[in-house]
Image (cartoon, helix red, strand yellow):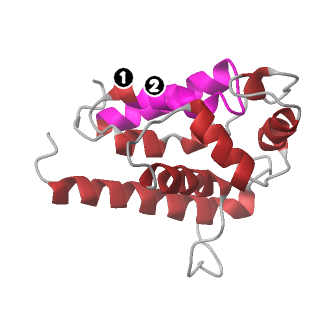
Amino acid sequence: MALTTPQDYSERVLACWLGKAVGGTLGQAFEGQTGPHHVDFYDPVPTGMIPNDDLDLQVLWAVVLDRMDQVVVDRRVLGRAWWDHVQFPWGEYGVARRNMALGLEPPLTGSFDNWFTQGMGGAIRSEIWACLAPGDPVLAAAYAVEDACIDHDGEGIWAEVFLAAMQSAAFVETDTDA
């Protein structure tokens, strides 16, 4: 299956973002809790999207890239946007901000004195890179590295790389084994 029209691409990107928004909204009530959870209904059913770091950071990346005359996905560009706009104080987000305040730049902001290097904060931001590199897993993975190194190292980076590449391939591949 190939992306044959701009409409086809738009529909797939919209489906990606809607899925992310729905998942983040429905999952928020359980964030940070241990499971397994046996949920078969929501009462009340949410009627709107909630603010959610899983999506908010990707929206920031989209805005930053959209404002560029020549789009460049680069850790320094993303790191600057992080410093200017990301105020989340917890986990790897807070460590990255502290490291930036110390004068470090990515990738050191993600690796220095960071006990969250293996966290999922990067992995939850992977969809944007697939949407910007549909059908090009290598490029999506390269973009993911630039993002994840801001607040992760090691497996925390590789998790985002894997998901971005897989999601990029999903734009054009219907065989899940492939």
Locate residue 18, reporting x and y percent.
Answer: 43, 63
Which residue extends farthest top? 154
Q: Quadrant of the C terminus?
A: top left
**In the depicted view, which residue is nearer to us: 51 or 176?**
51
**Which label number is shown at residue 142?**
2
**What is the secondary structure assignment of the residue under circle 2?**
helix
Q: Residues within 10 Å of mark 1 (few under 14, many from 20)?
A: some
**What is the secondary structure assignment of the residue under circle 1?**
helix
Left or right of 116 in this view: 123: left
Residue 102 position (above or below residue 124): above
User: What residue is pinned by disc 1?
Assistant: 138
Tell me which amino acid carries mark 1.
Val
Tell me which amino acid carries mark 2.
Ala
- Magenta stretch? 140-169
Residue sitting at x 45%, y 46%: 128
Left or right of 56 in this view: 106: right
Residue sitting at x 48%, y 36%: 73
Residue 25 position (above or below residue 32): below
